[in-house]
Amino acid sequence: MSQKDTVVAWLLEESQPAVRYLALTELLGVPEGGSEARAARAAIAARGWAKEILDRQKPGGFWEEGRSLYHPKYTATNWMLLVLSDLGLTKADPKVDKACRLWIERLAAKDGGFAGSSEGGANRGHLCTTGNAARALVKFGYVDHPGVRSAFEWFVENQSELGGWSCFNYGDGARGRNLDSWEPLSAFAVYPRQKWTRGMKGAVEKGAEFFLQRELHRQGERYEPWYRFHYPVHYYYDLLVGLDFITALGYTGDRRTDYAVSVLKEKRMLDGRWLLDSVNPDPDSPQGGWNRAHPKQAAVPFSLEVAGKPSKMITLRALTVLGRLAEGRARGSA
């Protein structure tokens, strides 16, 4: 058995049906409607990481406590739903549907976005919350929900002239200088192309160029957390995050991704797998500094896997990215 076959077999282990399902459909091209993929998907809520998360859900549809869907970071409802959306669950699961309806109701903002910690009729959407919620809700199957549609329109309306977005989309924060503000492009990466308006198409092109001009990492002094791979991502950025959305959007032949790809390949271990480098909040991030200074108010780290050990989530995403790049460059040379 080749090294790649060994790694794929590891991803296909039945102990984690979510990873198995994603490896089948994203890496091996197995049809979603086929018996093998359907069996894996049906098992996602029955065992493994997704079941463990669903088992902690309260009867009201939330995690932790009902007053806030956002706090505590990173174990409250907002964060649990982001992870579940990555694990292949959909609104067909009644627990997911109940939580998502609560999420939409409580975090929808008057301007069409989704708010963060200010819940219940907030005036302004927040970029990170809107981007993450829009991506997750599309993956859950709410692609035609009016709140989801309005979120994608919100991205167009709040994009900076520079092509990026800013965490706070008003006042001095609207400069659009930060690669950390990646969430709109990740949401567009899963939003069906036939639903894109002309404005949305232009926003994606301008946003992708913003990241490509910076080669997915060039912004001021070197920022170490961007070179470490994390999961869950929450609202943080790293080079694998950048490669994931930029290749999913079809930018697989642009040489400005070469540096990021070289980092991805260098981080591959001799056995063909990738490590989970760190768990958010990364110790070198501002949130990590806040945690150390305010231990009683610190965010609660959440992880499916152990930092410093081989990671199925990171390995799956890395192989998916490399597969897109290989396919795109093969088309370009044909």
Image (spheres, rainbow, N blue to C red):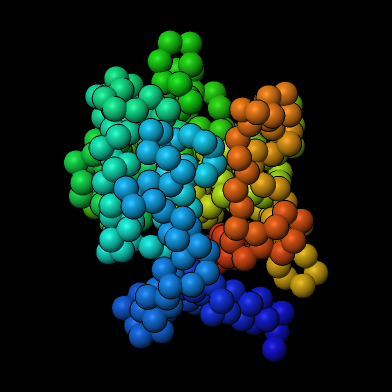
In the depicted view, which residue is nearer to us: 230 or 318?
230
**In this view of the protein, can residue 225 be seen by the observer?**
yes
Q: Quadrant of residue 280?
A: top right
Question: Which residue of the protein is positioned furthest toward the bottom in this rendering?
Answer: 1
In the depicted structure, whether residue 105 falls above or below residue 316: above
Question: Which residue of the protein is positioned furthest toward the top in this rendering?
Answer: 171
In the depicted view, which residue is nearer to us: 298 or 145?
298
Residue appearing at x 48%, y 24% in the figure = 166
Horizontal placement of 200 versus 325: left or right?
left
In the depicted view, which residue is nearer to us: 23 or 76?
76
Q: Position of residue 9 (x, y in %)?
A: 61, 81
Horizontal placement of 62 versus 26: left or right?
left
**In this view of the protein, can residue 211 be seen by the observer?**
no
Q: Position of residue 174 (x, y in %)?
A: 45, 17
Q: Quadrant of residue 168?
A: top left
Horizontal placement of 301 versus 136: left or right?
right
Residue appearing at x 48%, y 11% in the figure = 172
Residue appearing at x 71%, y 48% in the figure = 278
- How many numbered discs, if any? 0
Q: Position of residue 94 (x, y in %)?
A: 28, 61
Locate the N terminus and report the quarter of the image it occupies.
Answer: bottom right
Q: Quadrant of residue 46?
A: bottom left
Residue appearing at x 74%, y 61% in the figure = 309
Q: Position of residue 102 (x, y in %)?
A: 29, 43
Horizontal placement of 180 versus 196: left or right?
right
